[in-house]
Amino acid sequence: MNRVSVGFLLTTFLGLGGCQLNIQAPNLDSETQAQFYIQAIAQGQQAYYKANGNFASSLDTLALNFDLETPDYRYNLVSEGKNNHRTIITATAKTDNLPSYAGLLVMNTTSESLDAVANFCQTTEPSKTAPVFPDTVSTDSIVDCPPGSIPVQ
């Protein structure tokens, strides 16, 4: 599956963000599937925030109906800050030969707009530890990947 197809699936997901979804990820290798899930969860979080004014506090609350129990990755979602305005999504490798991933999504709400700042990173080497974002980030600029990780393309 090429990036255009994955991009189409994510765009489709965005358009349906207001309802409960049954998503079956296409047949992807483990790493691409982890990237797909991280981005799909982030899109779900963004839609949830727009509907509720805060991020979902757990994957169960987010109500995405796709199977996050995979042999290669453990998925986690942590929402934090005042009114859960920041969420971190991780895909932590269960085996020694895969990279781990983390996605950060921060919402900046003003009286005129609702803006999201996001970044998705993967470890540069295989790791059973996901990248760790700093506790504070500016919503006015792009968030850099933590040391030992690079942006997901």
Image: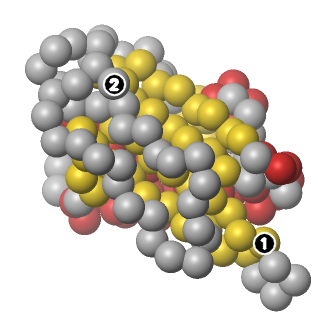
Q: Residue at x 29, y 13 (%)?
A: 94
Label 1 sits on a secondary structure element that is: strand
Check whether the beta carbons of the residues at disc 1 and disc 2 lie within 8 A of each other.
Answer: no
Q: Earlier in the sequence, mark 1 or mark 2?
A: 1
- Image point 76% across, 47% down: which residue? 81
> How many angstroms separate mark 1 from mark 2 (CA)?
31 Å
Callout in the foreground (1, 2): 2
- Residue 70's quadrant in the figure? top left
Q: Indicate whether 124 appears above or below 69.
A: below
Q: x, y percentage for residue 16?
A: 62, 57
Of residue 153 and residue 127, the one placed in the foreground of this image is: 127
> Residue at (41%, 19%) from the top-left corner?
74
* Residue underneath mark 2: 129
Count of marks placed on residues: 2
Residue 142 lies, with reference to residue 1, above or below; the image says: below
* The C terminus: image quadrant: bottom left
Q: Position of residue 143 (x, y in %)?
A: 45, 64
Q: Which residue is mark 1?
A: 109
